[in-house]
Image: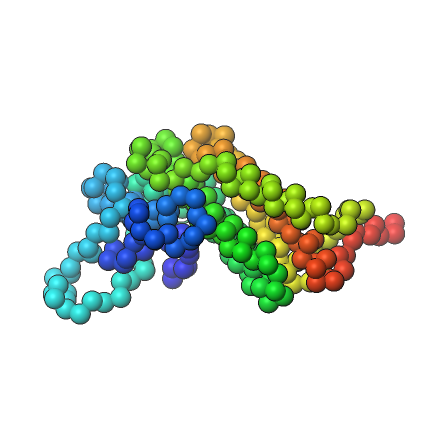
Amino acid sequence: MPIPSPLRPPRAGAALPRPGHQDPCPHSHVPPPPPPTAAGRSGAAGGGGGGWEPRPRPRRPGGPASHSPARAPKIYTGTGDAGFSSTFTGERRPKDDRIFEALGTTDELNSAIGLASEFSSEKGHTFVEQLHKVQCMLQDVGSNIATPLSSAREAHLKRTSFSEKPVLELEQWIDKYSEQLPPLKAFILPSGGKSSTALHFSRAVCRRAERCVVPLVQAGEADPNVAKYLNRLSDYLFVLARYAAMKEGKEEKIYIKSEP
Ligand SMILES: Nc1ncnc2c1ncn2[C@@H]1O[C@H](COP(=O)(O)OP(=O)(O)OP(=O)(O)O)[C@@H](O)[C@H]1O
């Protein structure tokens, strides 16, 4: 059964975001990310992997005629069943390729932040707007990861570049929250209420995403700003976790060395 994922591109026939159209994420600094598979499938279908225009699914003999009422497009194709999937550049790679490992971990990170954001929203934290912006940025991170430089063409790069700007923005946020926090006197443990603990959990997933991305950057496959962004993001999530605990008046548990 396919796992619904924000990285899952719309299937053929579904409305796809296009350059110049309303960006579904107002904070995004690049156009909506292109769906990796759509391009890959175009490529696999002999289209050269160039575009990501939706292609009509071939009609099965005896299948519905084109004037039949539109059916909801299926989200599965089964093309990944043999353990291979597509990059945005149209390459077919095994699913345990480090690109999919990094893509999947970024997706996991986005989900963890989504959960932290929901807990934080229940407590009225205003930083949830920032978390929304981060979630959008992680889509852009995914687009960059799904576009290995070795097989990317100019058009791919134009759509999936990742600048240093969001890194600098994270630094501003980190500085703003850090100034308000009590100084650290001991190792703190993931704790301090649900918002705080979910933010700590997101931080740990973020560090795993960073570990997945670093080899891609070192191989020249992903943009160094993506690794920088993830590195800064884990610091942001750390200070935010502490800030959430402080605002909610929740105690942060500290490490206590057990007696020998
Ligand atoms: N297990 C995975 N982990 C991370 N990324 C994946 C994984 N499988 C696929 N992807 C990426 O996410 C995109 C969307 O996933 P999707 O499940 O549609 O691919 P698929 O498994 O190749 O196709 P299908 O599910 O239709 O058989 C793929 O094009 C690929 O870039």
Quarter of the image where the N terminus is located: bottom left
Can you give x and y, in whole percent of width and height, for residue 193 in the image?
A: 69, 62
For the residue pair 151 and 174, the one nearer the viewer reads as 174
Image position of 10 (left or right of 103): left
Which of the 4 image quarters holds residue 88? top left
Q: Name the image colouring.
A: rainbow
Considering every residue shown, the one lying at the far bottom of the view is: 69
Tell me if residue 216 comes above or below residue 28 in the rendering. above
Query: What is the x, y in percent for residue 36?
Result: 34, 46
Residue shown at the point (43%, 44%) measured from the top left: 29
Badge count: 0
Kindly tell me whether residue 112 is visible in this rendering.
no
The answer to whether residue 176 is seen in the rendering is yes
Up-down relation of residue 68 to residue 127 (above or below): below
* Frontmost residue, 250 versus 78: 250
Q: Does residue 133 appear left or right of residue 53 in this picture?
A: right
- Vertical placement of 42 versus 3: above or below? above
Q: Residue at x 24, y 58 (%)?
A: 13
Identity of the residue drawn at 74% across and 62% down: 249
Q: Is residue 250 left or right of residue 176?
A: right
Residue 16 position, x and y percent, is 29, 54
Residue 170 vs residue 227, the one in the foreground: 170
Image quadrant assignment for residue 149: top left
Tell me residue 157's x, y (percent).
Answer: 36, 35
**For residue 165, side relative to residue 151 (left or right):** right
Instruction: Name which residue lies at 37% across and 52% down.
Output: 23
